[in-house]
């Protein structure tokens, strides 16, 4: 079962990772028009990767090649449903440190960064 992570708890989750763990990847699975409408801004302490949900299966081999199986991954979409599906898919395909950002970019804007527009 995929862990649900509130955006307000993202920093605590990131900081709880092992000292030798790579910085977490925030995987935004929204469509390009959604990213243009409202985006998470990269911060110190995580890498931002944008792959629309529909492209994840086709890019799985690339992800598996570029990221270790224990790469901390936090999946993000608009409200948390698409990202949950992607998180489950990634876990089923060997990634072991996957969480879903509960409430998506909507919750991110409300809990972490009010400068992110709601849509």
Image (tube, rainbow, N blue to C red):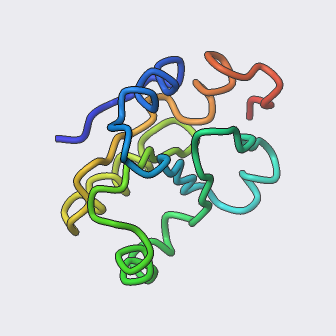
At x 45%, y 21%, the residue is: 12
Q: Position of residue 76 (x, y in %)?
A: 52, 44
97 on left or right of 104: left
Q: Nearer the viewer, residue 94 or 30?
A: 94
Instruction: State whether residue 116 is above or below residue 61.
Output: above
Q: Residue furthest front?
A: 20
Instruction: State whether residue 40 is above or below residue 102.
Output: below
Q: Nearer the viewer, residue 24 or 59?
A: 24
Instruction: State whether residue 43 is above or below residue 70.
Output: above
Question: To which quarter of the image does residue 32 belong?
Answer: bottom right
At x 36%, y 56%, the residue is: 71
Q: Position of residue 103 (x, y in %)?
A: 49, 29
Q: Nearer the viewer, residue 68 or 77?
A: 68
| Number of numbered discs overlaid on the protein picture | 0
Question: To which quarter of the image does residue 60 belong?
Answer: bottom left
At x 50%, y 51%, the residue is: 25
79 on left or right of 74: right
At x 52%, y 35%, the residue is: 79
Quadrant the C terminus occupies: top right
Quadrant the N terminus occupies: top left
Q: Position of residue 63 (x, y in %)?
A: 42, 74
107 on left or right of 100: right
Q: Nearer the viewer, residue 21 or 38?
A: 21
Q: Position of residue 117 (x, y in %)?
A: 80, 31
């Amino acid at each position: 079962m995929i862990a649900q992570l509130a955006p307000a708890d993202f920093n605590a989750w990131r900081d709880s990772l092992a000292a030798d763990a790579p910085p977490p990847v925030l995987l935004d699975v929204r469509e390009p028009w959604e990213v243009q409408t409202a985006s998470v801004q990269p911060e110190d302490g995580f890498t931002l990767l944008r792959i629309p949900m529909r492209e994840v299966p086709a890019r799985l081999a690339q992800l598996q090649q570029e990221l270790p199986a224990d790469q901390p991954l936090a999946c993000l979409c608009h409200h948390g449903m698409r990202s949950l599906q992607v998180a489950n898919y990634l876990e089923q395909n060997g990634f072991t440190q996957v969480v879903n950002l509960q409430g998506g970019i909507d919750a991110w804007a409300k809990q972490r960064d009010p400068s992110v527009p709601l849509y």
